[in-house]
Amino acid sequence: MKETIGPILRPQRRLIVAAGLAMIGATVVSLSAPLLVKLAIDRGIDRHDVHAIDVIAVMYIALVLVRPVLERVIVLCSARAGERFLGDLRVAAYEKLQELSMPFFEQTRAGVLVSRLTADVQTLTTFTRLVLVEVVGSVLLFVVSIGILITLSPLLSLVMLVSVPVLVWSSLRYGKRSRPAFLALRDRVADTMSSLQEGLAGVRVVQSFGRETDRYASYRRRSSAQVSAWRRISLVNIGFFPAIAFAQSLALAAVLVAGGYLERQGRVTVGTIVAFALYLISLFDPIARLGDWFSEFQSGRAALTKIATLLEEPVTVRGGELQLPERGELVVENVTFGYGDGAPAVASVSLRIEPGEHLALVGATGAGKSTLAKLLVRAYDPDEGSVTYGGVDLREARLDELRRRIVFVPQEGHLFSGTIAENIRLGRPDASDEETREALRRIGALERFEALPGGLGTDVRSRGVRLSSGERQLVSLARVALADPSVIVLDEATSSLDPQTEAAVEQALAVLSDGRTVITIAHRLSTAERADRVALMEASRLIEIAAHDELVAQGDRYAQLWASWQAGLVA
Amino acid sequence: MDPGWRYLGSVSKRLRWTIAGAIVSGLAWQGAAITSPLLIRRAVDSGIVHANRSTLSWVCAGLVVLGAIEAVAGGTRHYFAIRNRALADASVRDSIFRRALDLDARYHDRVGAGELISRASNDAELVARLFDAIGHTIGYILTVLAATVVLLVIDWHLALAVLAPLPLLSFGFGRYSKRYAERTKVNQEELGELTSLVEETIAGIRVVKGLGAGPSLSARFRRKSNEVVQTALEVANVDAVFLPALEALPLVGLLVVLWYGAHRVLDGDITVGTFALFTFYLVLLVNPLRTIGQRVSTVQRAAAAARRVADVLQAEPVVVESPSARPFPERADVRFNDVRFSYGDERPILDGFTLEIPAGTSLALVGGTGSGKSTAAALLARFYDPNAGSVTIGGVDVRELRLDELRRGVGLVFEETFLFGDTVRGNVGFGSPDADDAAIMRATRLAGASEFVERLPEGYETVLGERGFSLSGGQRQRLAIARAILADPQVLILDDATSAVDATKEHEIRAALAEVMAGRTTLVIAHRPATIALADRVAVVEDGRVVEQGRHADLLARSPRYRELLALAAQEAA
């Protein structure tokens, strides 16, 4: 955690030091008050010295004036340091997401990632804004109070030690019992949340089977378990915090008894006793308050750990140094790749795709065609063998260069909030309006989008609920047109569109394909029929590759598939 | 009254006993804390200054007793604080979930699961914090009030001088909480935008990676994050004015005691003990005033969160059971009578949609995206109610049927399947918890899923879902079909339910589908001709109405529009 969080915290060190110094100053000011009271009693009141009281009052005025200034410095510096740190942490986490490769996203739930960057950072806001200041302030108050007490009267300080056994015993017990209780709570919270999340995400299914009542009942069991886990924590607390209060009054009584005795012997003054009693409050209050902040402190720490874990996630796909040529052939050489420890998803595949060639990847679900496509865009690195473009191993190419030359277009057109134009510029944010329009014009979709009420400035709203799925696909193709890559790897959409939109998408695809290398993960054999060559995958292996007609004439696996596909069309 | 406050009121009512516990223990706790200075005064005045040993010893005994009361009450307060927090949190979350399960599709279309989850977690947490703080805040308020009264009684001259700035405080409170609320709102809005950018990025990570759009999105994120930092600092600036003022208040009081109080001791108006007592009280006030100041933000945030929660709870489902609801009819003839429907106030999706499916027969709906096929299916299961016209089953308007029987009588399989984090067995048996293993296996086999299920690491006991084993789209769809088959509805709707099943595999389950559809009123929405051909009849939908009907073969033969539709959907334009 130190290595990842440290560098993010470092730029704020001046502010943190300033806040710390102000905090020490403020503590000293607060703690000087009892000392001045002591002086007022011993020098002023006992000796009937009006002048001494006036001098003490003037000294105190100075302190009272300094205190709010220090307090303001604390609030401003800690807020600045805290918020900037959180801002940098958030940005670092987001940039980390951009660095991480596909396997990570496939293994991690989206909701978890979102909450790392939102809810967890939010938890830390309370942590930095309040908890840290309170905790550090309390600790300072505690330490300085002890120091003052000892210098004031070592004898009375010794008397105060009667409270120590109670404190030590209850702290040890608390430490031992609270940890498992908090851990159990965290598990219960996770349980409740996943049950809730599932019920809400699947609400249509729940309703269509009329299972609302027992979904709620199974959630309620978990929710109640969470309440019980809290109860266990409260029972642990109930033993600890009273012990502190009790120790405090024990110490107070001891100081008064011993103080009275010592005063009669002339070894302490009344002022000292009063000051002592006052300091006891500053001594015990922080401990009691630490308890109030304890659970917040714990959850803040947990959140920081979770974010640090994300930041420490190893990056598996890193860019190299080499440039990629404008045009080049894609060569897959003896590539084997597997997810985890199972059987390989792609086994010993070799394949060569010439510049400008259109290749269709076909095969049953799970045959490995999508995985092969992902290897072509370096979403993964092969376990064995290599993928090269224009003679350069993809692992040695610069990553930005690679993403510009070889573009992957997934099935669904995912939209970001913002205007249509902004969405099209996703891959090239510096493109001008004219370039954006030109990209749309090229794929034949300019008129369609200009006809919208706000034209290209139309806000697509969150996740594009206003555009139809065909229009979303067109936006995603326009992105590709603007990015102008040499190789397009396309995951063909499976959902069907209305005929007009389908035709528009087809036309756009045809324009884009012209002169570029296109590899399509084909879900319909009619797409394969139109490609230059067809590659058939079966059980992780490439078993047939040739032009459609040749394969059909050959009469093997592809020919059988084609026959059954055609039968499906006319049956 | 503001809905947020009203909601907080209703939660308080539910928690009234534990809140009462928190208040009583909070009062006892601080009550004991503020009585001890009175004893200290006695100790100083008679015990120490006048060397009266018996007074000193009973005062000390009293201090220990008070300490014990403070300890026990303080512990009880802690207990109730945590109890209130846990109960308030659960209460908010539970009622949101309960309400969400009852709300209809129109609401869920608009609000979305993520939004509801954030209400049930983040907002519940903010409300819970308020309830956590009740006992201890009330105790502190008591401290401030009681200290005021005690000081006034003991020496009103000095007390008035010390407490003069307090009225200023209440004025400051009002201004502070207003400004704090304004600036927090701006900050929350900025945070909301940042959150949606994160969500969109993760949801569209394939696009982002595929296009290499990372750097440009990072720049956008950095910009937005800076805005969040800026607005958060604006909030801190408000704090930086108010909190120091709050801290300074007891110090000013101490100053007055030191100077004016000491002069009064010298003049013989008050004793040294009283002087000590005044300083003691003022030191005691530091922490309560500080905490009360922080509560301003706790209350503001809780009220804002409660407003968002109340928003959800006040939403009324439009689809509700009629008071005179009737049982599900024996014969499930389905009729759509001149149905009109629109999702918002936009153009109607269904416009004069009329269709009849005689009991026990099947019908395929064919048409382009947006033609209204899925909407018609959703109306039949009464996920929505039509704006005009009616949908009837066995001659009875679906709005007149008992909702639970309707949902059980009409089985719907969606294109997008949702599997629960449960075993294969649990998922298939989701709608029929009483089904035995043999029935589950039979349904799985009929849906063409038994082959891959048996190959799963733990067969029917394999846990699926987000944290479980991940299946392909086609496999998921087959399990969803098995789930519907097992529920054995009188009316079955397959809404593009085989779209992700590989074309090369679909023929394998076609026979199974035919078996399921036999003798059952079935509505099929599909694009592949072979699947469409399974239905007894076909209806072509265009612009929200049925434009042609007939047998698949007849339509193929006589309707160029039908041929074009099929060809475009499946062949030429693919």
Image: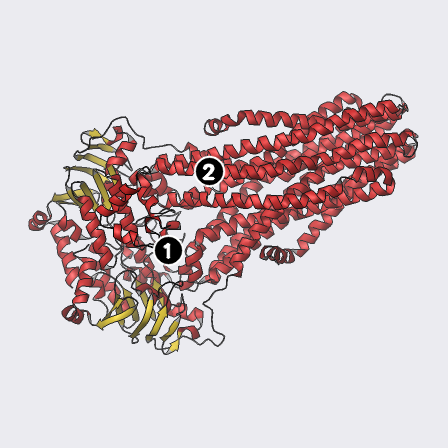
Residue B171 - label: none
Task: State which chain disc 1 sits on.
Answer: B
Residue drawn at (48%, 43%) of the image: B190
Same-subunit check for callouts 1 and 2:
yes
Is there a contact, CB below 8 Å, between mark 1 and mark 2?
no
Relative vertical location of residue B343 with respect to residue A259 in this rendering, above or below: below
The image quarter containing residue B54 is top right
Residue drawn at (73%, 36%) of the image: B249
Relative vertical location of residue B283 with respect to residue A147 in this rendering, above or below: below
Determine the residue located farthest toward the bottom in the rendered image: B395
Q: Earlier in the sequence, mark 1 or mark 2?
A: 2
Q: Is residue B456 visible?
A: yes
Where is residue A165 drawn, in percent x and y?
Answer: 72, 31
Q: Is residue A250 left or right of residue A2?
A: right
Three-letter amino acid code of the residue under disc 1? Phe
Q: Which residue has dot 2 on it?
A: B225
Q: Is residue A230 left or right of residue A250?
A: left
Secondary structure type for disc 2:
helix
Residue B418 - label: 1
Where is residue A231 drawn, in percent x and y?
Answer: 61, 48
Where is residue B495 drawn, in percent x and y?
Answer: 31, 62
Q: Is residue A72 left or right of residue A91?
A: right
Quick one: label 2, few (<14), some, or many (20+) residues within 10 Å? Answer: many
Three-letter amino acid code of the residue under disc 2? Ser
